[in-house]
Image (cartoon, rainbow, N blue to C red):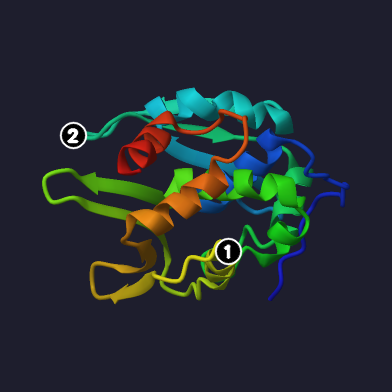
Amino acid sequence: MTKKFLGSEKNYIIDSPEKAYTLGFLWGDGNLLNIKNSNLFYPRLEILKEDLEQIKDLFKVWGHWHEYTRKRDNRKEQSIITLYDKDLGWFLSKYDYLIKSSNEPTKILEIIPEYLKPLWWRGWIDADGCFYFNQKQYFRQFSLAGSYQLSWEESKKLFTKLKIFKYNMQYTLNKKSKSSIIRINNKKDINLLGNYIYQDSFFIGLERKRIKYNSII
């Protein structure tokens, strides 16, 4: 049964680096919080507190987010932010953020201007991507993690556009894990991807990811 969302169809225009980046990040680590016994859905994000401190001001482009922190045993502090805006919840649901574990980000990418798409990809990579460099073994890798259901079609389209042809996908299905990953294992192609997502002068995002990428190239 299809849920009927409570919210208005506002004309959200993606016209800034902050909007593009945060939408990419929400595609990775965000979710839509459903208020019990209602059809209200609100954007929510939970990440490491130290990471949120670097990027939380970017999310203010959408409104005022409520924040709280929790600490679990033997784990770093996590921060959770929620925006109680049913209209933005409606917008995100319309563009598949409620079913992003099984759907490609095709709809949202279609409404983002070309010059801002690298910021959207940077956001998703900051959320779910990893740049890895083992200096002793000279091993370099980029990976982007997702759900088991993903076909990775949009990522493959991007790689083709950037002339990245050496990559692989891995699907894991067992009692402990149900996931998939797309990865690049060579410096040349990692550089092509990095040149794309970091091509602009907008120094926004997680610094540790950019530093790791720079160490690879």
- How dense is the environment of label 1, judged by Cα within 10 Å: few (below 14), some, or many (20 and up)? some
Amino acid bearing label 1? Leu
User: Is residue 14 rendered to the left or right of residue 77?
Assistant: right
Given residues 78 and 60, the one toward you in this image is 60
Vertical order, 144 against 1 (above or below): above
Q: Which residue is mark 1?
A: 158
Residues under numbered marks 2 and 1 in contact, where contact means CB atoms less than 8 Å apart: no
User: Is residue 73 rendered to the left or right of residue 156?
Assistant: left
- x then y, percent, for residue 41: 67, 50
Q: Which residue is mark 2?
A: 74
- x then y, percent, for residue 7: 81, 49
Given residues 114 and 127, the one toward you in this image is 114
- How dense is the environment of label 2, judged by Cα within 10 Å: few (below 14), some, or many (20 and up)? few
Q: Quadrant of residue 212?
A: top left
Residue at 56%, 30% in the rendered image: 204
Vertical order, 151 against 46 (above or below): below
From the image, which quarter does the N terminus lie in?
Answer: bottom right
- x then y, percent, for residue 50: 38, 26
User: Is residue 179 rendered to the left or right of residue 89?
Assistant: left
Given residues 116 and 32, the one toward you in this image is 116
Q: Looking at the image, is mark 2 or mark 1 nearer the viewer?
A: 1
